[in-house]
């Protein structure tokens, strides 16, 4: 057994690189030169509330007409709402900080402990493909325009040096306690340079007499694929060691607090053929013993699942993949004391024998752990003929295995798949969505590098991330999938570009459990989905057809084919205004 445990460790070994300090780091130099003309009218440091819809450029004064010292937000109890302030200065600020007070409404208080402040840091980004139609394909960064863009929400750095003739954003997130009383809560945000107060901004949150459930109780099916191997490489720790889990906990808590429902598990070597900077290894040890029988070790798989469940992600386990992007399956051969590969495809006898043996063992293990009912054998963008052949193998191993697919819509697969996710460009028939929901099946959609918009690239308009969940509400879907929560590039805090796909396509959160503008806006969209769901259920019970009609009307704005005429920010802000009337 000791040898087998050593083998399990060997399978998950990785090259360890030195990680950066988690509390402070340096941004890369701005490739865009400052235009002095733009700063000629700015004589002293300026501070104003801005918009969470805008990524303010570092090298330009904030495009704000009229300094705004007051801002009003509306929230339900249990909801998290955000605001952005902006500082732009013609002189160097050597110690910029901002602090927030408690928010009070009469004798009631929202503690500053429920408010997070973050600097909006800058990361290198790119652009769409030259045809503007998407962002897929391998790319040389030198062939694309590259700029610094505001995205990282750095809550760890206590102060910053702001160079002359530059702008700096600050992000304020207020998580309204569920026990808060309805009312108008007011407080202040004080912006300082050292001991000198630059400005005091007023922050008001109007708390309505409605309650948003805790994230673990949200109905929205959020599936953002996690990559533990990226975290191990970045911090230079042994995969699935105690230190690794310690570092991952705050990262994965961001996902759980966003309402994340699905645990991503890799049950074979490189299910995506190593397409990310840090390849997914197998969380299951495949060992062919000298006598020809098989041994499967689930130690790492168990540790990973138990860890993710401890963060609050418990609804589903998606196991990738019986149909990887390269049909080659690695195992350790005891007789030759070496790794070997089976090259076989769905429909072939060797493939069936190989997988039935594993799946029978896997099913037994899952049942012993009490996880069988929530585990899905998952595939990603596979052809229907391969899916059909694979389904035959799965059913032979255990007819009750659940199966999921993120890919193209095929009517033939509707009844076979427990979790079916299609591209935003396709549509499920309404009756299919209803019948699947009645059967307890999950029906969602996804975006990837193919869509120029809406998307979550680091250069995408921030409101597009929030738009995504509103679209789920419009289409009566259960949720949304994005393939990468944290498949980090080499230096994710400095440069979000990758050799394949557009900048930011591979991750939504940053080292140090730093969130992003994209992630926060995505969460706001999920909250909006929940509010729409709750209101529609209430109005249906009360027979308030007029209110339901109003909600359905605003949801019609969330059609990707209309984004050219109705930008995401316009749709989101109008829809929020309507929803917050109730």
Image: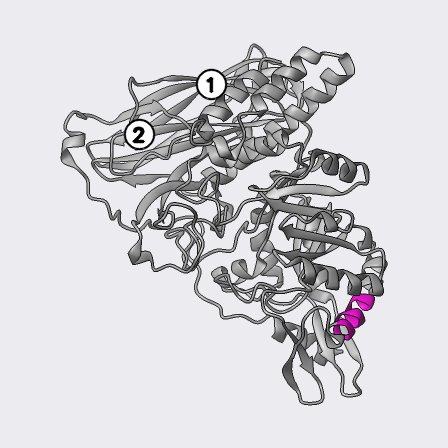
Badge nearest the viewer, 2 or 1: 2
- Where residue 347 appears, as percent x and y from the top left, is 73, 70
Q: CA distance from mark 2 to mark 1?
A: 19 Å
Q: Earlier in the sequence, mark 2 or mark 1?
A: 2
Q: Answer whether residue 434 is magenta in the image.
A: no
Side (left or right) of 278 relative to 544: left
Q: Secondary structure at mark 2?
A: strand
Q: Quadrant of the N terminus?
A: bottom right
Residue beneath the point at 44% across and 60% down: 19
Crowd tier of the residue under label 1, counting other residues whose Cα lies within 10 Å: few below 14, some 14–19, many 20 or above: some
Residue beneath the point at 24% across and 31% down: 89
Residue pointed to by mark 1: 187
- Where residue 226 appears, as percent x and y from the top left, is 59, 53
Side (left or right) of 199 relative to 76: left
Side (left or right) of 87 relative to 255: left
Q: Nearer the viewer, residue 148 or 564?
A: 564
Q: Secondary structure at mark 1?
A: strand
Q: Is residue 196 above or below residue 242?
A: above
Range covered by the magenta-colored residues: 352-361
Q: Is residue 514 above or below residue 54?
A: below
Crowd tier of the residue under label 2, counting other residues whose Cα lies within 10 Å: few below 14, some 14–19, many 20 or above: many
- Where residue 521 appears, as percent x and y from the top left, is 50, 34
Say which quarter of the image contains residue 267.
Answer: bottom right
Q: Quadrant of the C terminus?
A: top right
Residue pointed to by mark 2: 87
């Amino acid at each position: 057994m000791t040898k087998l445990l050593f083998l399990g460790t060997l399978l998950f070994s990785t090259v360890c690189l030195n990680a950066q300090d988690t509390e402070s780091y340096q941004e890369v130099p701005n490739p865009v030169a400052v235009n002095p003309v733009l700063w000629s009218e700015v004589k002293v440091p300026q501070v104003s509330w801005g918009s969470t819809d805008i990524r303010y450029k570092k090298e330009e004064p904030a495009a704000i007409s009229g300094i705004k010292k007051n801002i009003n937000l509306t929230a339900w109890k249990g909801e998290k709402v955000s605001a952005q302030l902006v500082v732009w200065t013609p002189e160097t600020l050597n110690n910029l900080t901002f602090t927030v007070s408690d928010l009070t409404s009469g004798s009631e208080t929202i503690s500053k402990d429920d408010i997070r402040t973050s600097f909006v840091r800058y990361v290198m980004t790119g652009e769409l493909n030259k045809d503007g139609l998407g962002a897929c394909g391998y790319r040389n960064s030198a062939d694309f325009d590259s700029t610094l863009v505001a995205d990282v929400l750095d809550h760890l750095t206590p102060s910053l040096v702001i160079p002359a003739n530059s702008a700096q954003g600050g992000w304020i997130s207020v998580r309204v306690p569920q026990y808060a009383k309805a009312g108008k809560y007011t407080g202040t945000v004080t912006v300082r340079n050292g001991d000198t107060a630059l400005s005091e901004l007023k922050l008001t949150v109007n708390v309505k007499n409605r309650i948003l459930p805790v994230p673990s109780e949200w109905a929205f099916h959020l599936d953002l694929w996690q990559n533990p191997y990226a975290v191990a490489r970045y911090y230079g720790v042994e995969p699935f060691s105690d230190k690794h889990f310690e570092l991952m906990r705050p990262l994965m808590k961001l996902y759980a607090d966003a309402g994340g429902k699905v645990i991503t598990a890799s049950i074979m070597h490189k299910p995506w053929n190593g397409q990310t900077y840090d390849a997914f290894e197998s969380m299951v040890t495949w060992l062919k013993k000298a006598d020809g029988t098989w041994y499967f070790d689930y130690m790492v798989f168990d540790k990973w699942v138990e860890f993710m469940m401890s963060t609050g992600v418990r609804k589903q386990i998606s196991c990738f993949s019986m149909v990887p992007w390269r049909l080659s399956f690695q195992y350790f051969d005891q007789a030759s004391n070496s790794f070997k590969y089976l090259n076989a495809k769905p429909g072939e006898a060797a493939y069936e024998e190989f997988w039935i043996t594993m799946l029978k063992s896997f099913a037994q293990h899952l049942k012993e752990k009490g996880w069988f009912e929530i585990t899905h054998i998952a595939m990603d963008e596979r052809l229907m003929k391969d899916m059909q052949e694979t389904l035959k193998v799965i059913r032979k191993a255990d007819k009750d295995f659940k199966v999921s697919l993120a890919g193209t819509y095929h009517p033939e697969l509707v009844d076979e798949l427990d979790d079916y996710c299609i591209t935003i460009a396709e549509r499920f028939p309404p009756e299919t969505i209803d019948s699947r929901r009645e059967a307890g099946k999950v029906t969602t959609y996804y975006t990837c590098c193919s869509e120029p918009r809406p998307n979550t690239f680091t250069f995408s308009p921030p409101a597009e991330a929030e738009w995504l969940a509103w679209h789920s509400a419009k289409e009566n879907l259960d949720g949304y999938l994005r393939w990468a929560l944290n498949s980090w590039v080499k230096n994710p805090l400095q440069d979000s570009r990758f050799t394949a796909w557009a900048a930011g396509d591979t991750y939504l959160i940053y080292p140090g459990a730093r969130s992003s503008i994209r992630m926060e806006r995505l969460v706001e969209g999920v909250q909006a989905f929940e509010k729409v769901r709750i209101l529609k259920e209430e109005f249906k019970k009360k027979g308030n057809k007029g209110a339901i009609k109003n909600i359905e009307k605003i949801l019609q704005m969330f059609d990707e084919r209309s984004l050219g005429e109705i930008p995401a920010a316009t749709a989101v802000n109008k829809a929020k205004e309507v929803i917050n009337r109730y």
